Amino acid sequence: MNKVLRLAVPLLLLTGSFTGAMAGRISIDPPTVWPHTDVPGDPAVTFGTLPNGMRYLIQRNTHPDHGVSVYLRIATGSFDEIPAQAGISHFIEHMIFRGTSHIPDGDVFKRLQALGLATGADANASTGPEATIYTFNFPNNDATTLDTAFTLTRDIASNVLFDPKAVDSERQVVLSELRLRDTAQLRMARAGDKIIYGEELADAYFAIGNEAALNAATADSLKAFYATHYRPERAVLIVVGDIDVKAIEAEIQKRFSDWKATSPRPQPPRYDLPDPPKTATAHLYVENGANSAVQLLWLKPYDPTPETKARDERDTVREIAFRILNLRLHKLAASADPPYLQAGANAGNSYRSAFVTSLAAGFGTGDPKRAIKALHETLATILRDGVSQDEVDRAIEQQRTALQTTVTAAPTRVNHQLAGHFLGTIASDSVIDSPDNWTPTFEAAVKGLTAARVSAELRQLYVGEPLLIAASPAAIDGGSDGLLAAYRDAATPPVAAAAAAPVVWPYVDFGPAGTIKTQKTIAAIGVTEAQLANGVRVTIKPTKFQEGQLQVLVRIGHGRFATPKDKAVPLWALPGAWGLGGVNRVSLADMPQALNGKEWGASANVGDISFQLHGQTRPADLDSELQVLMAYVTDPAWRPEALAKVKSAAATGMEQAMTTPGGVFSLHHWEYVHGNDKRWAVPSTDTIKATELAEVQTLIRNDLTRGPLEVVIVGDIGVDTALDAVKRTFGALAPREVDTTPYPGREEMTATGKASLVLYHKGKTQEAVATLGWKTTSLFPDPQEARILRVLEAVMRTRLFDEIRTKEGITYSPQTASNNSWTTPGWGLFSVTATVPAAKLADFYAAAEKVAADLATNDISADELERARGPLISEAEHARETNNFWIGEIANLQVDPRGVELITGYVPGIKQVTGADVRAAAHKYLKDDRALRMIVAPEGFIVPALP
């Protein structure tokens, strides 16, 4: 049951694979049978094993209607490679899409696009240490789709061709991906892995391999590894969707029963592990661009305990224990003088190699020694004194609330969520059990649970002294010895403080409830609009997409567009200073206790046309959710420590971004394409340091008091119930300003033609980011023009994929985008972007302009048009079956009702786009006098003359 309840704690801050193991020699062998224990399997899932050893599972699911997901997991990855083969599993993953017995090179993605799949979003693959996974989310379940799904997955199993020319072409793409990932954070992670695992196993965790091994790989060596490791007993096929289960099972048996291994079963890999530290040791990694983080790791052998009712009970107790410990760490992070930005604790297996218990913290621009001392003191105190029964009871209630939400929503999980859940349980050898089993299992585990039991579990996990690993973008006084001394200084914990009085949520009465001034329903989209007497607008969309789930959005004022164009203001600091500042009468650290047993959230954001608060809740807790958001509007705390944390995180993030081409691009691109408009400017490090809280408050103070305000509610609730809850909260506000027309964006764009803006990154890589954009048009007055541009974008993306990835191999992932302003007449941007070797910049621009010129001159084929339109239509239709879509699309409709036609007219409009429309749009917009170029190159690189 623990497999569906994940602790809400930060991920390990240094590397996802930072774990450890006891000394000795370990063997890593993939599972080949379904686990059978006293935990009952889910009767809704059909499990099967073919005579050749291949496993499969099938579940009928009608979310979305007519959709089907087909996932293939092969239990082979970088753990199976010797050093000379490093990255070969990942290389093979790429070659799957370069030609099989039944699908020629270049046709895989075309066939998938013809069925409505978008490359990357709907059709993808990944390689890790233990497994290679192929995922296909089909929008339809017709005979052609299912035939393609089974033909492709069967070919993946044993029919890949490995044409030498295709291998040489794809090698460049894999090397491009290797270079793209070569960042300070990755080098930091690898350095840490080597400290823990030693060179051999650490390299095995790095699935993408190294340049020497990838260059040495041949078609024959790829084919040999593929034949050895792609074996039926290592495969699991997952099919979830709107299907006939028996028919699918028969098709699997028909298609895959003839799959036979053609080589002897390989021996499982074995790795020598270093001796674990007998006393606390510290290691420090320093590089500009690295994370500012520390970890304390307690290393144990991999825990092979199978999932049973007893293990589920143990894991539930652990979850309660970590929830308590993490709340204590969170309170320190939210204190007036926090020792770190964020911290978290957790424990678990790392693949099949080790079990690790951890404490981790990110310290930003703060003091890593102080962070280490705080982590150690917090842990030593809880281990010495134990947890209190009050803490246990609160943690149980919090866990129960989360579980109830999960169980309620389980019947409406979409195909890819179910398939992803199955992948996780397969990887951990867990039992795929029914959601009906989760609550009884939890309640049995927590019945009579005592503080003594929870304390004992923590003490078993944190035994002995840790391995301490820190990373920093700059040198730390005293180095690793200084960090170890900080750990030792905190060895004696302070006296435990007396238990505080229970915290009561005080924001429950805001005065007389409001009344409704106007109300109407837009039948075409099932949305109800209301305006309260005080001017607050309410927009409600009842849905059943996620049972028992609601999203709430509060929109205030006019956001980015209301700030100066020619003067930078600290918009970057507002979300954190406002959100992390909390509310006056309850500290942010105490809000979980004050709202115990409730599902609530409050995240702040700056939008172009409004400032925003967003939360997710369930119908029973809507009143509490609205009370929280109301408190953030009427009584925000603006605590100085919140701004200090934001400044620390921003300064660290800025320095990290400057070490990668993509980071520099993301910092400056939007300011550039808006004609150096300072509303999109990023602050300098000096500006971040000098920012005062009063400057941030000024940005939103007047809007919080009287600015236009809209409450948007989407999800599993009735209109009247939602309106009543809003009337009791936001309806009690004093009268507000009311917008009658859309707020003007006043955006500008200056085309540069053949000239380029050239920026530089500070990283070690010789990669560059190149973008070529063209000024287009706004969303209004002609939304169909924007739809034509979306189709043109899809065609351009496929053409570039063929031209500069498949043929030239100079980039891993070319990207395209089409943006059209809602509010500023004439503002639109069509762009193509890629990360390429700096020496290949001219090749990128030549290819992009070649594709653009051809599209502007020649009609596209009917087949290419359908392949472009199909994924756009499927994406739109499936997006409309999510709350996320509606919460964004229906906001502001009361001010700008043109948005209704954008929702209802999008799919019909995409279907009406013709090849002539695409050519005409390319001819009109993809011109030199409308062009913008931006390049981010390595420092010292001289950008050559470009076409």
Image (spheres, rainbow, N blue to C red):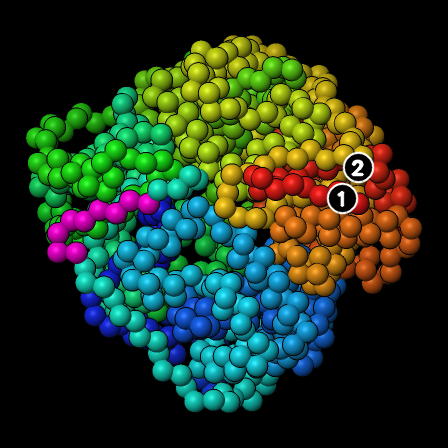
Determine the residue positioned at 28% across, 56% down.
195
> Mark 2 highlights which residue?
754
Q: Nearer the viewer, residue 491 or 870?
A: 491
Q: Which residues are magenta?
A: 277-285
State which quarter of the image contains the N terminus: bottom left
Given this view, does label 1 or label 2 mark the residue nearer the observer? Answer: 1
Task: Tell me what residue is drawn at x 54 percent, y 54 percent.
Answer: 179
Mark 1 touching mark 2, by CB under 8 A? yes
The residue at which mark 1 appears reads as: 946
In the image, residue 76 above or below residue 368: below
Instruction: Report which quarter residue 785 is drawn in.
Output: top right
Does residue 886 belong to the magenta stretch?
no
Pinpoint residue 558: horizontal percent, then vertical percent. Answer: 61, 19
Q: Which quarter of the rendering shows the C terminus?
A: top right
Q: Is residue 515 left or right of residue 352?
A: right
How far across and down, in percent of the image, does residue 77 sit? 44, 70
Quadrant for residue 624, please give it: top left
